[in-house]
Image (spheres, helix red, strand yellow):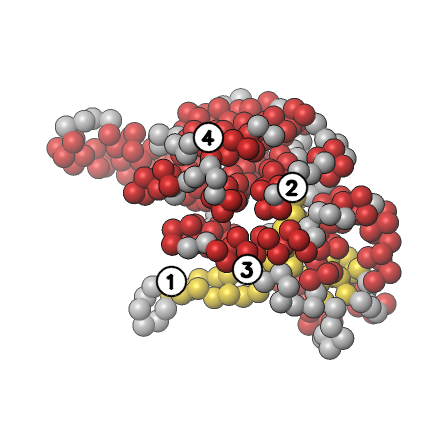
């Protein structure tokens, strides 16, 4: 991870370029698939590859642009095969555009790249892009200190904390977003695990911020769903989204209706099925948060980048100059970013004191 391959320097260079383009970025995101094991009939995971540099940018209509960069510094790379492999990964993870970053890229390969919506970035192009996007301005962002400290935190995680991070780092990127949204909102309920987070523990702060960042990502997907469904009916749109769409909600309502006689006998409560299976306890707070996002499109587009910087400060234990790191810095966006954190902590019952240093930033 991070330092284990010779493409690391290329990755962080291109990560900074994408950041300066306005993308929220990550490196080395696993790409996995599952199939039923012939013997056990249980899901078996296949680690296919990883996304070297991945970025997302939210438009003010909540359409999410997704881009992927593949970095290769080696000489013995079969370029045609690599190009079509990259196109396959792009299609599998649903990205709009791809970048092939390599020391040299021939003219013949560029002809193929043009037809596949992949940009070829050789060393000269990479240097020029660094100049155009002024990455020297953020040279202390995504540096070795950051990745060294982050790796130390990840390697120190044990027990349930390690399992949570494994979900966030691997399974999250395979699941559909409605499933992720529901999982992130209830994952700390088991055995009252939310009570175990301590304000003076760096790893706990890191994990919580990682959850909040990915929670925010699912909120944007929910907003995107509502924008093309019915923006005048946000509560209904949120309800549909958490159940996987109109058909998912309809199926769940029909299931509860069929189960009502049984549930009434067991609980002596008529509405228990609706409360448990249709409208989860977090629905009203989630709906309010989605409403804030949709009503403030220009002020929320960059929230994931603000949250990323807030987590970055936890990792390196230093303050960053946000106005330098985000050219369009807005105090309003920073405030809403903190509101997202507070909303998640309130829904999951985690003590706000755990992230007080972030909320008081």
Foreground of the two, 38 or 254: 38
Q: Earlier in the sequence, mark 4 or mark 3?
A: 3
Task: Find residue 191 and report its horizontal and vertical position in percent.
Answer: 29, 43
Locate residue 15 relative to residue 202 in the image: left or right. Answer: right
Residue farthest toward the bottom in the current orientation of the protein: 76
Q: Secondary structure at mark 4?
A: helix
Q: Earlier in the sequence, mark 1 or mark 2?
A: 1
Q: CA–CA distance between discs 4 and 1?
A: 37 Å
Q: Secondary structure at mark 2?
A: loop
Q: Secondary structure at mark 1?
A: strand
The reply to whether discs 2 and 4 touch (Cβ–Cβ < 8 Å) is: no
Q: Earlier in the sequence, mark 4 or mark 1?
A: 1
Which residue is label 4 attached to? 352
Which residue is label 2 attached to? 318
The reply to whether discs 1 and 2 touch (Cβ–Cβ < 8 Å) is: no
Dividing the picture into quadrants, the one containing residue 303 is top right
Foreground of the two, 307 or 91: 307
Q: CA–CA distance between discs 2 and 3?
A: 32 Å
Which residue is drawn at the image coordinates 32% and 39% (left, top)? 192
Q: Nearer the viewer, mark 4 or mark 1?
A: 4
Which residue is label 3 attached to? 31
Task: Find residue 1 and report its horizontal and vertical position in percent.
Answer: 58, 62
Dividing the picture into quadrants, the one containing residue 107 is bottom right
The reply to whether discs 4 and 1 touch (Cβ–Cβ < 8 Å) is: no
Q: Nearer the viewer, mark 1 or mark 2?
A: 2
Q: Nearer the viewer, mark 2 or mark 4?
A: 2
Which residue is label 1 attached to? 43
Number of disc labels: 4
Which residue is drawn at the image coordinates 54% and 66% (left, top)? 48
């Amino acid at each position: 991870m991070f330092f284990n391959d010779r493409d690391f320097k290329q990755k962080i260079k291109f990560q900074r370029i994408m950041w300066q383009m306005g993308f929220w970025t990550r490196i080395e995101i696993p790409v996995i698939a599952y199939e039923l094991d012939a013997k056990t009939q249980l899901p078996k995971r296949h680690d296919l590859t990883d996304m070297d540099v991945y970025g997302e940018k939210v438009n003010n209509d909540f359409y999410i642009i997704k881009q992927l960069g593949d970095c290769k510094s080696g000489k013995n790379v079969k370029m045609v095969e690599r190009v079509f492999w990259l196109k396959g990964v792009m299609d599998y993870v649903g990205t709009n555009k791809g970048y092939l970053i390599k020391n040299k890229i021939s003219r013949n390969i560029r002809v193929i790249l043009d037809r596949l919506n992949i940009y070829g970035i050789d060393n000269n192009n990479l240097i020029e892009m660094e100049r155009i996007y002024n990455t020297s301005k953020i040279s202390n962002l995504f540096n070795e200190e950051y990745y060294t400290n982050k790796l130390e935190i990840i390697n120190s995680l044990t027990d349930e904390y390690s399992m949570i991070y494994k979900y966030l780092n691997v399974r999250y990127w395979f699941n559909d977003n409605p499933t992720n949204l529901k999982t992130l909102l209830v994952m700390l309920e088991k055995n009252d695990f939310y009570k175990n987070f301590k304000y003076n523990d760096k790893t706990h702060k890191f994990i919580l911020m990682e959850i909040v960042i990915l929670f925010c990502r699912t909120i944007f997907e929910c907003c995107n769903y509502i924008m093309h469904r019915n923006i005048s009916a946000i509560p209904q749109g949120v309800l549909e989204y958490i159940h996987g769409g109109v058909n998912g909600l309809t199926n769940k309502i029909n299931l509860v209706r069929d189960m009502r006689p049984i549930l009434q006998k067991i609980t002596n409560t008529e509405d228990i099925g609706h409360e448990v299976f249709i409208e989860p306890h977090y629905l009203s707070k989630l709906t309010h948060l989605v409403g804030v996002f949709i009503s403030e499109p220009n002020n929320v587009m960059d929230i994931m980048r603000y949250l990323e910087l807030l987590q970055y400060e936890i990792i390196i234990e230093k303050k960053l100059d946000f106005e330098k790191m985000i050219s369009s810095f807005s105090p309003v966006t920073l405030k809403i970013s903190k509101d997202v954190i507070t909303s998640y902590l309130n829904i999951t019952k985690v003590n706000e004191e755990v992230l007080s240093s972030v909320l008081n930033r």
